[in-house]
Amino acid sequence: MPYAAADRQEFIKRSGIAPDTHILDFGGVLYEEFPCAVSGITARKQLSNAVIMKPALVPFKDAAFDAVVSYHYFDLLPSDLLGYVFKEVARVLKKDSNFSFMVQLWAPQNEAQRSSLFFNELLKASGAIYTHEFTDISGELSDSGFGDITVETIKRDILIPRDFVRSHLMLLGNLVKKEQKEGVAGIKTLAKQYFEQVKEYGEAMLPALHFTAKKI
C-alpha cells in the first residue's frame, strides 16, 4: 500500500523502536521502513531477511528479538488465534522489550471511510479479514505475558487512489461469482452497497488502534 507510506512512518515514530535493534516484522509489511529487520511471512515473497513461518509457531529461539512490530497483519487472523500468536511473540522477545502493532478500527469517521467499511464487510463475509475487539486484544496481551499495555486511536485521513479502488471493484466481481457458484450469502447485496458508496464518496482508510505492550 504505497498510499499508506506516511502512516507506516508515523506508526514507527509512535512505537519508539530504534531501527538498528534486532526487530521481527510480523507479517513483513514494514520491509521498506525496517530493511534490516527479520520479515516473518506466511507466503513466499522476494524480500531480504524473510522467514516463512506459521503465525502461531514462530521459528526462533527464546528472547531472540529486541522488538516485534506488525502493521495490520493481525487483521488477517481470526480472534481465536491471537492468543497463540501473542504467546509466541512474548517467547521470542527479550525481557522489557516492546511489542507494537496496529489493527483496523471498524468505525468510519466520514463517508469515504464508510466505503472501506463496506469493502471490509465483504472481505469478512468471504473469510479474508476479521474484526478484533479492544478488550479481547488487551486481555490476550495480558494473559500472554505483557504489561504496560497502551492503546491509541489513530483517526487517519488517507484517501485510497482510484487504481486501488478499481482493484477492489475487480475483486468484488470475483466474490459475486463465488456467491453464485458456492452460495456464499449476502455478497451481492454488500457489493452493491460498496459500489454505490465508493462511486459517490470515494474511499479512505479506516481509523486504527495502535497497541503497545512490554514483555514482562
Image (spheres, rainbow, N blue to C red):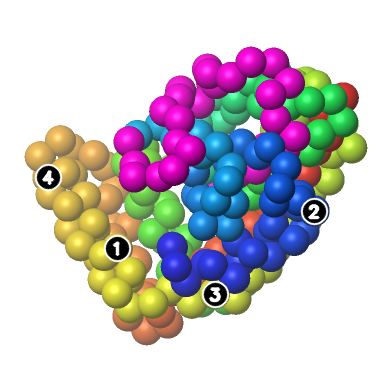
Measured as percent of width and height from the top left, residue 24 is found at 61, 36
Q: Which amino acid does label 3 sit on?
A: Ile
Q: Mark 2: give few (<14), some (14-19) or many (20+) Cα within 10 Å.
A: few
Residue 21 appears in which quarter of the rendering? top right
Q: Which residue is drawn at 26% across and 71% down?
A: 166
Earlier in the chain: of badge 4 and badge 3, it is 3
- SS under mark 4: helix
For the residues bearing labels 2 and 1, Cβ distance under 8 angstroms = no
Name the residue beneath numbered marker 3.
158
Label 3 to label 2, Cα distance in Å?
Answer: 23 Å
| 55 w.r.t. 15: above or below | above
Question: Of the residues tagged 2 and 1, which is closer to the observer?
Answer: 2
Q: Mark 3: give few (<14), some (14-19) or many (20+) Cα within 10 Å.
A: some
Instruction: State the extent of the magenta-drawn residues as a range.
Output: 44-72
- SS under mark 3: loop
Q: Which amino acid does label 2 sit on?
A: Gly
Name the residue beneath numbered marker 2.
16
198 part of magenta stretch = no
For the residues bearing labels 2 and 4, Cβ distance under 8 angstroms = no
